[in-house]
Image: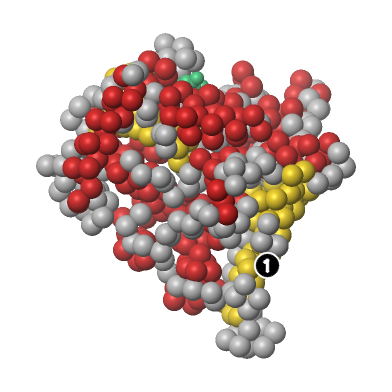
Amino acid sequence: MHTQKSRRNFIKKSAVLGAGITLLPHLSYAIDSSKEQKLNVGLIGLGLRGTNHLKNLVQRNDIIVSAICDIDETRIGIANTLITKYQKNSATVFRKDEYDYRNLLNLKEVDAVIISTPWLWHTRMAKDAMKAGKYTGVEVSAANTMEECWDLVNVHEETVTHLMILENVNYRRDILAVLNMVKQDVFGELVHFRCGYQHDLRFVKLNDGKSAYGKGVEFGEKGISESKWRTQHSVSRNADVYPTHGVGPIATMCNINRGNRFSSITSNATKSIGLHNYIVKHGGSDHPNAKVKFKQGDVITSTIETTNGETIIVTHDCNLPRPYSLGFRVQGSNGLWEVDGNRIYIEGKSESHKWDKADEWLAKYDHPLWKKYGEYAAGAGHGGMDFFVLNAFVESAKQNIAPPLDVYDAAAWSAITPLSELSIENNGEPQNFPDFTRGMWIKRKPYNWMKDTF
Ligand SMILES: NC(=O)c1ccc[n+]([C@@H]2O[C@H](COP(=O)([O-])OP(=O)(O)OC[C@H]3O[C@@H](n4cnc5c(N)ncnc54)[C@H](O)[C@@H]3O)[C@@H](O)[C@H]2O)c1
């Protein structure tokens, strides 16, 4: 009852907000929106990612960070320092235990929450947040198992509360320029995509327990930050455990859940040597972690088929030495973009059989959002995309409308983890994606990405 009531109040409040929000995101250095009602945000999880969100939130004029929650006293201290620096009001703190976040969710004044905790907490926290009527933002991936994917969808549909998966790569400047090219039909009819998460995380998954990127080969209880929880997934699961940075942008380009959908996936994994070799090299063969058997193959390759007849190759490659690349390729009947090599070829426009440097194309098709807010975005983290993903969340929450990256996206993208695991276990046997939209993908319209507001 209480939940429904506070949601209704918030919707009323949002209607008042509606008029001014399409002009500019209300950055403190943009326009003065102090007369407008503000969105009250609660943050759950204040590690490296949550703190980055906090930093961006407290610099906006349309936000009050009214509550924070973490079980680590040090992280609460860092967050409070930031809040005191930028905000008049202090935030109510929740730090008692792992379930204290539920007390944050009980606060009437909190309109929206952002969840930046370890993966195994995402779905249970997101479900509780939606049940409490809070507009919910969840970090990537959103879910770990097929049951969790369905849970997100079911709770959203039961509560009619929105959830946004906070996939920042969807807002990268080159990605939005390529999306613009897709929308303007430059590539022609889409046929094939490549993407993935190709990031040497050995020094993230293993550290010295004192600093996140410190030398050392500890993880679990003796580790710090992501090595505390992320590494165990490499021990326990042979799966693509982090698919959304790659597949999120591609899913948007080919209208997944909006006229198209993922139909099936096949996955294969290589042997696992990267993390073990790193431990031996930096900790010695006598180190207890040298005995740990890592289940996750070093390179996991999945091929997704869509109902519209495209294929998407998704790679997870995080345990071997390599420079960072998400490996994007977008290919259609007229030509293609490849991020590696920074090149584009469009038949009839490019010199026959020769690549163009992508820069000129990307500049020509620069997305309206980046044209308008590029300079504000610059300091926000990850080259600016963190500003845009958070801005989309805030502006959608203020109006209480469906976000650009919604619960069906969260479920379909996150489902790659359990489905790739099942396929690998069965020698690459194809696995079918469930239809999380229950048939609605047929008539759901693509989100309007080509606007300059959010
Ligand atoms: N989108 C991106 O570019 C990006 C970048 C980094 C991390 N992430 C995602 O953000 C999430 C957090 O990653 P991180 O790097 O900040 O990890 P982290 O380990 O630095 O932070 C996690 C925080 O959650 C807290 N926490 C754990 N259990 C809790 C509970 N029950 N209640 C309250 N707090 C709890 C921990 O104390 C810690 O401070 C992960 O899902 C990760 O995949 C996304």
- Residue 232, how many percent across, how many down? 68, 27
Colouring chosen for the image of the structure? secondary structure
Q: Indicate the amino acid at tag 1.
A: Val
Q: Quadrant of residue 23?
A: bottom left
Q: Quadrant of residue 77?
A: top left
- Residue 418, how many percent across, how many down? 70, 36
Residue 309 appears in the figure: yes
**At 63% from the left edge and 78% from the top edge, which residue is drawn?**
334
Q: Quadrant of the N terminus?
A: top left
Horizontal relation, residue 14 to residue 326: left or right: left
* Image height of 237 relative to 177, above or below: above
Q: Which is nearer the eye, 418 or 327?
A: 418
Mark 1 sits on what residue? 191
**At 60% from the left edge and 33% from the top edge, which residue is drawn?**
150
- Residue 381, how many percent across, how many down? 42, 48
Q: Residue furthest right?
A: 427
Q: Which is nearer the eye, 211 or 253?
A: 253
The mark tally for this picture is 1
* Image height of 294 relative to 336, above or below: above
**At 42% from the left edge and 17% from the top edge, which residue is drawn?**
102
Q: Label 1, secondary structure: give it.
A: strand
* Image height of 3 relative to 418, above or below: above
